[in-house]
Image (cartoon, rainbow, N blue to C red):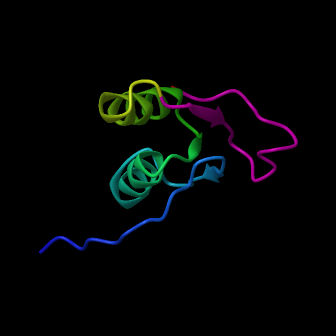
Amino acid sequence: MALTIDIPSMRGKLAVVTGASDGIGLNIARRLAAAGAEIIIPVRSAAKGEAALARIRQERPAHRLRHVCSTSHRLIRSPLSCRN
């Protein structure tokens, strides 16, 4: 049984969704994008980040999405290069 949760409009909001390269995190990112939020996905693997963004873009082609590569918890201050 699928759980359905109504998400109000997120237009003009920024959502940083950790764990969004797959599973529950990816589904949360997809739902937030559908509600209009700009999505940032912090990832350790560039390939997984690109795959997640491609999946969201299939549903929301013109949406603002990006992934930030980091192997550190200091994501915003010092993004590091991703491992593939």
Name the residue rendered at 52%, 34% in the picture: 45
The main secondary structure of the magenta stretch is loop
Residue 65 location (% of width, % of height): 55, 33
Name the residue rendered at 58%, 48% in the picture: 11
Q: Nearer the viewer, residue 25 or 73?
A: 25
Name the residue rendered at 39%, 48% in the picture: 30
Q: Nearer the viewer, residue 33 or 9?
A: 9
- Would residue 37 be found to the left or right of residue 27 on screen? right
Residue 83 location (% of width, % of height): 57, 29
Name the residue rendered at 81%, 44% in the picture: 76
Residue stretch in magenta: 63-83
82 drawn magenta: yes
Query: Exactly how many numbered labels are in the figure?
Result: 0
* Up-down relation of residue 10 to residue 78 (above or below): below
Residue furthest to the left: 1
Residue furthest to the right: 77
